[in-house]
Image: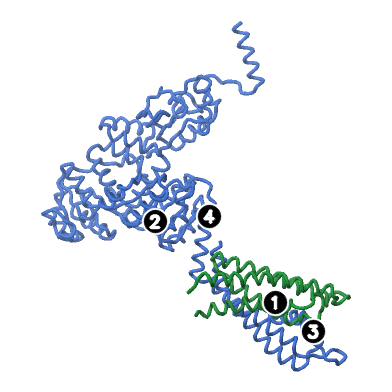
Amino acid sequence: MNLEKVVFAFFIVLALTLNFGFFIGELDDGTHHNIYELFAALVVSLIATIMKFGDRAHIGAVLLATSLVADLQLIAAVIVWTITVHATDVGMTPSIMASIVSLSGGALLANLTSVIILVTETVMFRR
Amino acid sequence: MHNIIYLLLRRMRVPLVVVILAYAISMLGLVLIPGMDDQGNIWHMSFFHAFYFVSFMGSTIGFGEIPYPFTDPQRIWTTVAMYITVISWLYAIGSLFSLVQDQAFRRVVAHTNFTREVRRIRKPFYLVCGLGDAGRLVITELAEHGIRSVIIDRDESKIHSLQLEELPLRIPGLVADVTDSSVLIAAGLCNQHCAGAIALTGNDHTNLTVAITSKLLAPELAVICRAESHDAQANIASFGTDTIINPFDTFAERFAMMFKSPSMYLVYEWMTSLHEAPLSEFTAPPRGTWVVCGYGRFGKAIQKSLSFKGIKTIIVELDPEGTDAPEGTIAARGTEAITLHEAGIQQADGLIAGTDSDANNLSIIMTALELNENLFTVSRQNGNNNDAIFAAADIDITMHEGRIIGKRVVDMLTTPLLTNFLRMAILQNDDWANVLVSRVVGVLSDRPPESWSQIISTKHSPAVVHLLKKGMTVTVKDLLTDPRDTRSALPCVALYLKHQNYDELLVPDDDTPLQTGDQLLICGNATAETHMRWTARNTHALNYICSGYDRPSGSLWRWLSARRSSKSSA
């Protein structure tokens, strides 16, 4: 067992689970989507990205790419949330919540791809 | 480039994770701890405000407590968060700086820059391995001729000193081991613009490795290789290396030529060396007994060529068994008066100091000259930085290994015709050489000549090609006439002419007609070169030389003169 591999897989899977936890629920219902969960999802996703830095293998490059997509989607969701609450008079409406959650849904897909690649790689190298 | 980014990202992994975690923990704390707004209500900081606050706190900018003054629990947490974020930032920045200073990282950066620079060369270039005396001479002279080169050496200080020199071209240099084939590939061995590989390191085996790598990876490439032992020479020649230069044999051959035909030696010396001494100073070496100090590779080569000429030699060598010296060898260094006395220095005519230590060579010569001041002295010089003392020591001939090799390589690359000329000249007799020397001395008075080549083509001599197309005859003499005064010739001599169909002419006659595609080798005064090149490019000047008639150049005057000539003929 390799501690580096454990930490690596831990962050990739955690990014997916946190993302899923935020995404699940009625699309436009603000009470189903916790802001703490979005924060945690973003932080873990960023850390997962850094974990993938500097891997020169092709599979490492694809992992990094999916992670960057997830980061981008989550950052977009956070920016939409921040601007809605702090920079407009409208405040949070169901339609804006729906767009935030769908952005995080995109990140969820990217994180899912990451995990699928990780599992595939693990299955291929049976050691 | 990719290497640098990957290395940077890999090494920055931990510091970046630490920074992100520090931010996340600080923000989470600020969001969770309750504060109080201006009306005294319980108030929770939003994630946006927490991020804003941590951003300016972590970077120690510090705008104060916003949007409302903090409560004490918030202040406690802020104190903790301040230390966490500042320390994590310092850690990240410190890691980045130490990475940039790291030797391994800097080597990767230098390698990447070098590879990119080589890839961007769009002109033919030579790959030179080994920046010794010979390598330095080759790249400097090539740069003076406008030819690019790339240098690899294992010694970092040599590559750095090259960057400080003011050369007319930028020479990319890399500190690396040339026996590694990937280094040679990075230096452009397989590049389409690479014109040849030149192995000039001091180690025969390294040169052999470079030659064989070049022949395998780029079979079309010209390979020039330095070899100091006959064993290595045969090995390198076995797989088709184009040119192998053995500095000791080259010098010994030249030395033997001095005895055979002093004039021929002079012709060779003018054409191939950096010798700047006046012509009158040349004296032929005596044919009496010679004392050879040091029976290494240099001593062996010299002794062989001397005994071939039937000249008696006495050998002084510290280690006669180890060097396989002939019988009658005096086992000593040769620096002491007693040994030289024993070798019969008083009766000898010549002395050769051929050890591999410059100090010993100088000591041998100084001691010997005290015993017999009429000696003809030949010394081997090993290092470039001893130029001044060798010049001061009043030695008749100094053999500098690096200079002999370097000059051979430069001549081969910049004036290929010279090699052809010398190959034909060596077959001529002494009388031929005497005539040539007196002709050259006749036009040059006392200065050593320079040599250059002229190609008859639209690019290099448009005027000649233009007149030839019009059916006129241009002779060698026409090209070498002074354009300012058509009655006198330029101070130079045509040495060799090669036609397009590979017919060769040694010292062509003045009235030899030139043809398109001819290559001409000329030697003479440096100013003659400038004037000759001008004639070769200027149609009016050449036309006037050939016909003695100044043709009108503008279209109006051309039309008028055509009318006038048709009128007069009518």
Q: Is residue B27 left or right of residue B253?
A: right
| Discs 3/1, front | 1
Q: Is residue B28 left or right of residue B395?
A: right
Where is residue B367, by image quadrant? bottom left
Q: Which chain is painted in green? A: A
- Residue at the outermost bottom position: B72
Residue sitting at 29 percent across and 32 percent down? Answer: B433
Could you give the CA–CA distance between mark 2 and mark 1, rounded to whole angstroms?
Answer: 59 Å
Front in this rendered view, residue A55 or B143: A55
Q: Earlier in the sequence, mark 2 or mark 3?
A: 3
Could you give the CA–CA distance between mark 1 and mark 4, rounded to whole angstroms?
Answer: 46 Å
Residue sitting at 25 percent across and 31 percent down? Answer: B429
**What's the residue type where badge 1 is placed?**
Asn
For disc 3, the marked residue is: B66
| Discs 2/4, front | 4
Asked if both marks, 4 and 3, belong to the same chain, the answer given is yes
| Discs 2/1, front | 1
Q: Chain of mark 4?
A: B
Could you give the CA–CA distance between mark 4 and mark 3, rounded to whole angstroms?
Answer: 53 Å
Q: Chain of mark 2?
A: B
Rendered image: mark on residue B117: 4
| Discs 1/4, front | 1
Q: Is residue A70 left or right of residue A4?
A: right
For disc 1, the marked residue is: A19
Could you give the CA–CA distance between mark 2 and mark 4, rounded to whole angstroms?
Answer: 19 Å
Q: Can you give x and y, in whole percent of width and height, for residue B541 in the image?
A: 53, 26
Could you give the CA–CA distance between mark 2 and mark 3, rounded to whole angstroms?
Answer: 66 Å
**What's the residue type where badge 3 is placed?**
Ile
**What's the residue type where badge 2 is placed?**
Gly
From the viewer's perspective, is residue B95 above or below residue B251? below
